[in-house]
Each structure stands twice: as C-alpha cells, then as structure tokens.
Image (tube, rainbow, N blue to C red):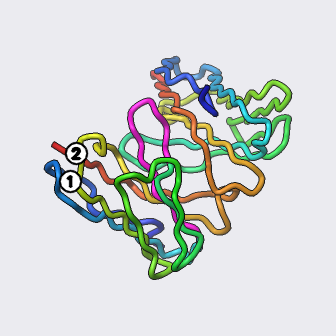
C-alpha cells in the first residue's frame, strides 16, 4: 500500500493563478481531510469528506474548493491564489472519523508570490 | 482563548533525558486525546491515543490525561536522537470530525 499520496510536493504560484493539489489514498478509507500547516500554528482543517459525493467545510475554507467523486481521490482547488495561501498542505484519511488514526500524506509546499 | 495551547519550544535535551511535553485545552467536551509525531518535511503520524483520564504507556512513551485540569502530557523516557521531531497534541469531541491540533513542540535530542 502506498498510503496517502500527494502531488505535487512543491509548487510556486503567482498571485491570481489557480491550481489543484492532488490527493489519493489506497486504503479504502471513507474519510478524507485537507489541512494547512503554518509555522507555529498547528494544523487547520480546510475541508473534509465522509464519503464519495459528500464534502463539508472545516475551519478555514475560504479560497479553496474540493470535490470527492471517488473513494480514492480528494483534490483541493485553489482559485485566485493569494500570498496568505502560502503554506504546507496535508491530505489525510481515516476509516471512520478523526477518533481513529488519521494517515497523512507527505505534504505539498506551496508558495504564492 | 485558543482551544488547545501548546508551547512550540524548541526544547533541547541531552540523549537519555526524560522529556515532558504538554498541552492545555479549554473545552470540557473534548474526550479523545492523541499525540502525533512529525519529522522534518514529513506528514504527522499517530504516536499515542487515549480517551480517558490517567496514564497510557507504550514502550518509552507515556501519555497522561487530567480532565479535571484540562491538561495532557507526553513523557519520553531515555530520549534518543531519533526522537527529534515536532510533537503535536490533537483533541477531539466524542462524535466530532474536527480534530483540533496544538501548535506543536519542536524537540531536539542531542547525542
């Protein structure tokens, strides 16, 4: 099993550009999550999904969109990138929610200039 | 007031030392308590998990929860250079899908 795979690992965007961060898991987990991690701030939940076709906002959803068409994939879309979106983005998955172990990807380091 | 407070460190200790990492939380509805370890440029991985007050031990690691004080701790005995990482506490409600993370404490164990 590869676990949770995120692509790309690094990306530099110009202000106003758009991009999609890819996330795929091969553990057949129903729950998937997107977090951002800023220095000294812990992880903040952006969006999550409890199954294919179902998504919901987390703490910091503004400026992001998600979709979940399959169990395996949970892409995060950034529209009109802003410097405030410079961060490390982590995708995670779990079996039945966050009271079970969440498995994280390696992260995507995004810089908006 | 933040829901979870954690001293970001960095905390630097010699090899073999006992390390104490701590978090406080504000919401008494939190019932699930976890510690994640994150190596540099990697994703977090679950280290310890508990849902009750008291101690839980796993090898050199002990997680302690005091719900009356809203205080959780992670103790590392005989610390090793390989323990150098960021340790994040994470707390959840009984049926919540929102795992609240502390800021993370950077630990450096010197050989």
Q: Nearer the viewer, residue B32 or B78?
A: B32
Q: What stretch is highlighted in magenta?
A: A31-44
What kind of element bears circle 2? strand
Q: Are marks 1 and 2 in contact (CB under 8 Å)?
A: yes
The number of numbered discs placed on residues in the rendered structure image is 2
> Which residue does the numbered mark 1 point to in the structure image?
A11
Q: Circle 2: is it few (<14), some (14-19), or many (20+) Cα within 10 Å? A: some
Q: Residue at x 47, y 82 (%)?
A: A70
User: Does the magenta stretch mainly form a helix, a strand or a loop?
Assistant: strand
Q: Is residue B77 something one can see in this rendering? A: no
Q: Which residue is drawn at 44% across and 53% down?
A: A61
- Residue A40 included in the magenta stretch of the image: yes
Chain containing the residue with disc 2: A
What is the quadrant of residue A51 in the picture?
A: bottom right
Spatial CA distance of label 1 from label 2 is 6 Å
Q: Is residue B93 something one can see in this rendering? A: yes
Disc nearer the start of the sequence (1/2): 1
Residue B37 left/right relative to A73: right
Residue furthest out toward the bottom = A70
Image quadrant in which the C terminus of chain B is located? top left
- Residue A48 included in the magenta stretch of the image: no
Q: Circle 1: is it few (<14), some (14-19), or many (20+) Cα within 10 Å? A: some
Chain containing the residue with disc 1: A
Q: Which residue is drawn at 29% across and 59% down?
A: A78
Residue B34 left/right relative to B101: right
Query: In the image, which disc is placed on residue A111?
Result: 2
Residue A54 location (% of width, % of height):
54, 74
């Amino acid at each position: 099993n590869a676990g949770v795979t995120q692509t790309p690992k690094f990306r530099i965007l110009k202000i106003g550009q758009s991009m999609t961060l890819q996330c795929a898991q091969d553990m057949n987990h129903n729950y998937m999550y997107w977090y951002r991690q800023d220095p000294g701030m812990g992880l903040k939940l952006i969006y999550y999904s409890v199954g294919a076709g179902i998504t919901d906002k987390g703490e910091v959803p503004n400026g992001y969109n998600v979709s979940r068409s399959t169990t395996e994939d949970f892409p995060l879309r950034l529209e009109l990138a802003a410097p405030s979106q410079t961060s490390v983005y982590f995708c995670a998955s779990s079996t039945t929610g966050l009271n079970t172990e969440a498995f994280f990807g390696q992260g995507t380091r995004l810089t908006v200039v | 007031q933040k829901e979870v407070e954690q001293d970001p460190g960095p905390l630097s200790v010699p090899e073999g030392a006992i390390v104490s990492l701590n978090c406080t939380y504000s919401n008494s509805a939190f019932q699930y308590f976890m510690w994640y370890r994150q190596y540099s440029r990697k994703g977090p991985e679950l280290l310890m998990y508990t849902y009750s007050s008291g101690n839980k031990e796993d090898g050199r690691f002990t997680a302690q929860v005091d719900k009356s004080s809203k205080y959780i701790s992670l103790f590392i005995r005989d610390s090793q250079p390989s323990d150098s990482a960021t340790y994040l506490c994470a707390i959840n409600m009984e049926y919540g899908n929102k795992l609240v993370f502390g800021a993370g404490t950077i630990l450096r164990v010197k050989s």
